[in-house]
Amino acid sequence: MSKKWERDLSVDGSSLVIVGGGFRGCAGALAICESGLNVLLTEEINWLGGQVTSQEVPPRV
């Protein structure tokens, strides 16, 4: 990895960038935050939750 690419990965002082706000992305971001690091979580649509929330699928009980 080039030094220029490494510099480009630093976004707003975040330790880690997670692309995708589905269940896995949210769970990963939460775990990283609980360990004391800063996380930038991005999602292309206006809400988190991925397929479950975008398809209005009710949770199983």
Image: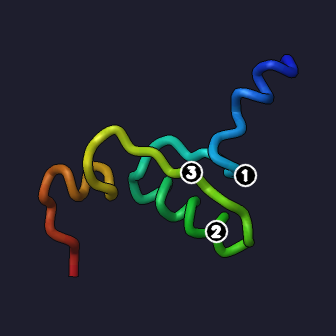
Task: Identify the residue shown where x is 48% and y is 56%.
Answer: 24
* Residue type indicated by callout 2: Cys
Helix or strand or loop: what does disc 3 sit on? strand
* Residue type indicated by callout 1: Ser
Residue 60, quarter of the rendered image? bottom left
Tags 2 and 1 touching, CB below 8 Å: no
The disc at residue 15 is 1
29 relative to 7 in the view: left or right: left
- Point out the tag, 2 or 1, that comes first from the N-terminus: 1
Helix or strand or loop: what does disc 2 sit on? helix
Residue underneath mark 3: 40
Alpha-carbon neighbours of circle 2 within 10 Å: few (<14), some, or many (≥20)?
some
* Residue type indicated by callout 3: Leu
- Point out the tag, 1 or 3, that comes first from the N-terminus: 1
Tags 1 and 3 touching, CB below 8 Å: no
For this rendering, which residue is in front, 8 or 23? 8
Alpha-carbon neighbours of circle 1 within 10 Å: few (<14), some, or many (≥20)?
some
Q: Position of residue 23 (x, y in %)?
A: 41, 59
For this rendering, which residue is in front, 13 or 54? 13
Task: Identify the residue shown where x is 24% and y is 57%.
Answer: 52
Alpha-carbon neighbours of circle 3 within 10 Å: few (<14), some, or many (≥20)?
some
Q: Quadrant of the C terminus?
A: bottom left
**Cα distance in 3D space between marks 2 and 1:** 10 Å
6 relative to 49 in the view: left or right: right
**Cα distance in 3D space between marks 3 and 2:** 10 Å
For this rendering, which residue is in front, 31 or 46? 46
Q: Quadrant of the N terminus?
A: top right
Task: Identify the residue shown where x is 76% and y is 21%.
Answer: 5
